[in-house]
Image (tube, rainbow, N blue to C red):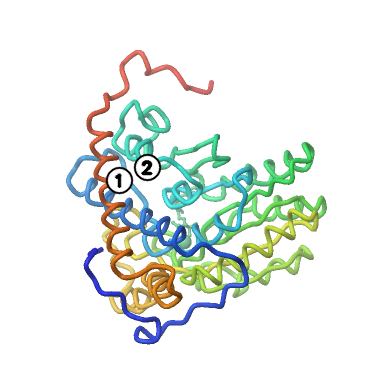
Amino acid sequence: MQASQPVASNAERGTQNAEPTTPLDVREALRLMLTIRLFDERALALYRAGEMRGTTHPYIGMEAVGVGVMLALRPDDYVTSTHRGHGHTIAKGGDVRKMMAELLGRATGYSGGKGGSMHIADMDKHMLGANGIVGGGMGLATGAALTARLQNTGSVAICFFGDGALEQGILHETTNLAAIWKLPVVYVCENNQYAMSARSDWSVAGGDPARRAAGYGIPGLTVDGMDLFAVNTAASEFVERARRGEGPAYLVCNTYRYHGHHAGDPLNYRDKEEVERWRLQDPVERVKSAAVERGALSEAEIAELEQRIEAQIDEAVEFAKNSPEPSVDQLMTDIYA
Ligand SMILES: Cc1ncc(C[n+]2csc(CCOP(=O)(O)OP(=O)(O)O)c2C)c(N)n1
Ligand SMILES: [Mg+2]
């Protein structure tokens, strides 16, 4: 991402954002989206430079989903994430220094440097964790919603999951339970069109996944997941509905991951034209245009914001690299046995 790029209008690009029906802070949304984009671009660069062990699953292209949903939440609402979890953590207010340190295997990281990219949780922020198990967050989010109900806190739980997880049995079990008990949980499907190399339109039965909601008697809606405003409007409605005690919902966000499944993916299963078509819908550029068009930010302020975030990420990398690796006496701690 180049900080000096001029901001094209949505009309010039041929895109249009939904009219928000919620009081969305566009400046804060753009800050979070840019932080996610620049963080994951840096993570890819560190991987390619051989500075990261394991791998990383970039959220690049999907920023409108995580941020659009998160800006519909209260701080005490719960979130469960996926293997592609950096965006969710940043949007929920996570610490980029601790996340970068975890990616680089340092003792100052979220999991003491022993977990890496897919083991990032922030309990203080009610971010219940990334998860290497496809569909693994569904039971946790539904359990968090049950906790909120029993403790009468008014919190709602959000369960992010990929289109690949639509094939997991636990989705049926948790939705059924949440529906009959009217639990405050919103299941957010990030349909980025692929589960590894499998296209969702030929691996997921039944067409639009939101239609499955009817089978449980709960609302289901599919939105343009490249449009922050559309995601935020739909998420706000479902979250407030759940908070009122009216039960769960399915929100399906159609989106795209620009990069491979993980940093080392050879990407030999899709053509470049498809990627270019989706990039025309870029969620970050659309919010930049909206910010300028609404007078929330000038082009100069956007450029300055990008520079500030780049500096924040430089600082996070410095912090990580200057942190020690976990020591040998940490080898047998934090083990569940
Ligand atoms: C239960 C389980 N089955 C298979 C895998 C291997 N696996 C890891 S990611 C992935 C694809 C997930 O696709 P999707 O849910 O669409 O998420 P995306 O990667 O597109 O964000 C698979 C099959 C796994 N981690 N867990
Ligand atoms: Mg997917």
Does residue 87 sit above or below 213 in this rendering?
above
- In contact (CB < 8 Å): disc 2 and disc 1: yes
> Up-down: is 312 above or below 63?
above
Nearer to the camera, 249 or 132? 249
Percent of width and height locating residue 268: 28, 66
Question: Nearest the camera: 324 or 70?
Answer: 70
Q: Residue at x 55, y 64 (%)?
A: 24
- Mark 2 — residue? 96
| Residue 317 relative to residue 94: left or right | left
Residue at figure coordinates x 46%, y 60% from the top left = 29
Q: Nearer the viewer, residue 211 or 307?
A: 307
Q: Amino acid at mark 2?
A: Val
In x, y percent, where is residue 300? 28, 67
* Alpha carbon distance from label 2 to label 1: 8 Å
Residue 315's place in the image compared with 240, above or below, is above
* Nearer to the camera, 38 or 129: 38
Is disc 2's CB within 8 Å of ligand 1? no
In this figure, which residue is indicated by the disc labeled 1?
Answer: 312
Disc 1 residue type (three-letter): Gln
Answer with mark 2 or mark 1, whichever residue precedes in sequence.
2
Q: Is residue 180 above or below residue 250?
A: above
Indicate the secondary structure of the residue bearing disc 1: helix
Q: Residue at x 51, y 58 (%)?
A: 162
